[in-house]
Image (cartoon, rainbow, N blue to C red):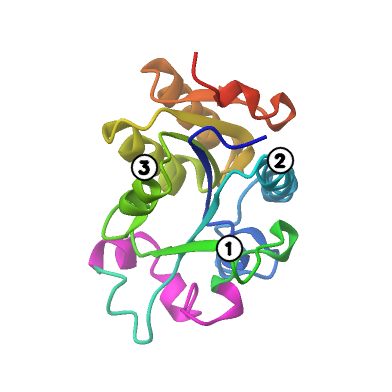
Amino acid sequence: MTSHGRALIVVDMQNGFCHPEGSFPRIGLGLEGADAAVRNAAIAVKQARAVDMPVIFTRHLYRLGRADEGPALIRNSPALAVVNGLAAGSWDAEVVDDLDCHHDDLRLDKVRFDAFQWTSLEPLLRGLSVTRLLICGVVTNLCVETTVRSAFMRDFPVTLIEDACAAKTRRLHELSIEVLTSYELAKIVRVEDGFDVGDPD
């Protein structure tokens, strides 16, 4: 079996966000349901690999000195800089071990919510002949939703694996899913549905 022009994007499932000892839990911004989301994302990654679907792991991280963090994000979570969270090259910035991210896997580093902004994601997808996306990750109402919207505006149909996502609260997660559903910005599925749900009609 092959991927039929699809790719799986796993958004920001890094130690800083998803591990109990990561920077976000340490500054009081831990994610409700992160453990379950990671477990389900690991299943999604295995499903993708089983059908030769490209898997792209995004990482939100900042260079030494954090000049690329920017004033808006500094204001958004000032405590993150205090603990040097998501610093490039740190354990905090790495993809969680549960996802079995290999050295030869596709990784894409970003400094904004949108995985398309200032990155090579779009040319990478075009080069892989990808026309449809499956997306999961964190944080549902921030980086995940922003990336889904950006993909939609670039004419990539999106399937969002909602139980492989997490936000600060379950309510914020549900609100994001409601917004994406109400304007049909993404098809919403669960990991148990498998990947046939992402096939063209």
Residue to which mark 2 is pinned: 47
Residue extent of the magenta highlight? 71-92
Which residue sits at x=50%, y=27%?
177
Dot in front, 3 or 2 = 2
Does residue 92 sit above or below 118 in this rendering?
Answer: below
Question: Which of the labelled discs sits on residue 105, or is there none?
Answer: 1
Which residue sits at x=49%, y=13%?
201
Q: Nearer the viewer, residue 95 or 141?
A: 95
Q: Nearer the viewer, residue 70 or 160?
A: 160
Distance in Å between CA atoms under marks 1 and 3? 23 Å
Residue to which mark 3 is pinned: 146
The mark nearer the N terminus, 1 or 2, is 2
The mark nearer the N terminus, 1 or 3, is 1
Amino acid at the residue labelled 1: Asp
Distance in Å between CA atoms under marks 1 and 2? 15 Å
Amino acid at the residue labelled 3: Thr
Q: How many marks?
A: 3
* Residue 153 picture location, percent across and down: 27, 33
